[in-house]
Amino acid sequence: MADNPTKGLADVVAASTALSDIDGKAGRLSYRGYDIHDLAGRTTFEEAAHLLQRGRLPTAEQLADYRAELAAGRTLGALVEADIAEIAGRQEPMEALRTLVSLAGADDPDKADNASDANLRKAARLTAQQGVLVARYHAARSGGAVPEPDPELGIAANFLLQITGRTPSQREIEIFDACLVLHADHTMNASTFAARVCAATLSDMHSAIVAAIGTLKGPLHGGANEQVMRTLESIDRGRVAEAVRAKLAAGEKIMGFGHRVYKTEDPRATHLRKMSAELGESTGDDTFYRMSKEMEEVVFTEKRLYPNVDFYAATVYHYLGIPTDLFTPVFSVSRMSGWTAHVIEQHADNRLIRPDSEYIGERDQKWIPIDER
Ligand SMILES: CC(=O)SCCNC(=O)CCNC(=O)[C@H](O)C(C)(C)COP(=O)(O)OP(=O)(O)OC[C@H]1O[C@@H](n2cnc3c(N)ncnc32)[C@H](O)[C@@H]1OP(=O)(O)O
Ligand SMILES: O=C([O-])CC(=O)C(=O)O
């Protein structure tokens, strides 16, 4: 039987959204009508999150209020505090985040309230807490202390401070802030779709985010950034082309390449490639950047595939001193802003999401009693 033409829901429009838009042929991405090239490097993550969750780029006053709300919202609840050390000892980072966000839901003062004002408050708290959860998880498993967040710093700077234990340079903050902006939203990607399916049953925001985190974790989606770094680390630096060709010949996918929607360069990769080059040079060892460039050339020659957002994000995070198994959690720190905005949008104009399936199993089977099977 021929493959279902909508297998994987390719090209199926599953929701209407005013949050982000992609032109896959031209390689363009915009958030609420603002081209990503105009936002990255000029807009802080907090401004982008405000744009997505609250519908507009904030004025200075609105931004100050939003930042104050985020700062107040990053305090973790009693259940999370009580269990984080135990969870850090027993679960991998994305599994732990899934558990911790679920616990945060029990601690949240708005809990299962789906009203729009409650959803806005929960969206801000979830966005404020995600980076803190990653940092606290990392400290708990490594037995170290987490520096207190600096109230003068934003989410990007505080995250780097809390993960690396040192005050990041201004340029590192700018680069990481731009990374968070670049990852914030991306139409109906798998994790956002999962969040919307959950929200569309009129389940609550924390439940939808738990579904999204579990979905982002997989290596065909957000989990690819960690796999990119593992691939680079496993390849002999003088034999990149040979290693890539061997993987392709063995039928393996090369992590960080290909995309369901982009048929040309992912516009986010354009920024991340430049950041990787800059950070590689400034750290004095750009080997992984140069290996990445070579991989890009070989994959394009062999398969005509372009790097996606996860490819150069890997070396950027590596150069920023972020442990490799926290790369996908970093993605969730940013995408939390988009996921929560999608839940708000879904609840505001809801209809149950329930697609159909094509039945390919046996029919008209005759039932046989158990002792005769
Ligand atoms: C944030 C994000 O989620 S970005 C994506 C992150 N994921 C990755 O980087 C994982 C690697 N990439 C992939 O697996 C895919 O390109 C996806 C999942 C991103 C897109 O998948 P789809 O649109 O379903 O494309 P699909 O997997 O069917 O690939 C189409 C063809 O291109 C090939 N292909 C696609 N990506 C790759 C890759 N990275 N390496 C090698 N071949 C690939 C497939 O093998 C397939 O070939 P075939 O037609 O000869 O069988
Ligand atoms: O849109 C997708 O399918 C995956 C992606 O690039 C993202 O979620 O950022």
Image (spheres, helix red, strand yellow):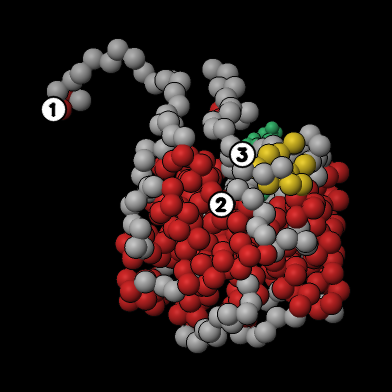
The answer to the question of whether label 1 and label 3 lie on touching residues, with beta carbons closer than 8 A, is no
Mark 3: amino acid = Ala
Task: State which quarter of the image contains the N terminus.
Answer: top right
From the viewer's perspective, tell me whether residue 307 is left or right of residue 71. Answer: right
Confirm or reject: label 2 Cβ below 8 Å from ligand 2.
no
From the viewer's perspective, tell me whether residue 174 is left or right of residue 213. Answer: right
Q: Is residue 232 visible?
A: no
Q: Residue 357, image x and y in percent?
A: 44, 24
With respect to residue 93, does 258 lie above or below?
above
Q: Label 2, on which residue?
A: 53
Q: Nearer the viewer, mark 1 or mark 3?
A: 3
Please, what secondary structure does the residue beneath circle 1 have?
Answer: helix
With respect to residue 173, does 114 lie above or below?
above
Q: Label 1, on which residue?
A: 371
Mark 1: amino acid = Asp
Number of residues whose C-alpha sits closer than 10 Å to that of mark 2, classed few (under 14), some (14–19) or many (20 or more) = many
Q: Nearer the viewer, mark 1 or mark 2?
A: 2
Q: Residue 148, image x and y in percent?
A: 53, 84
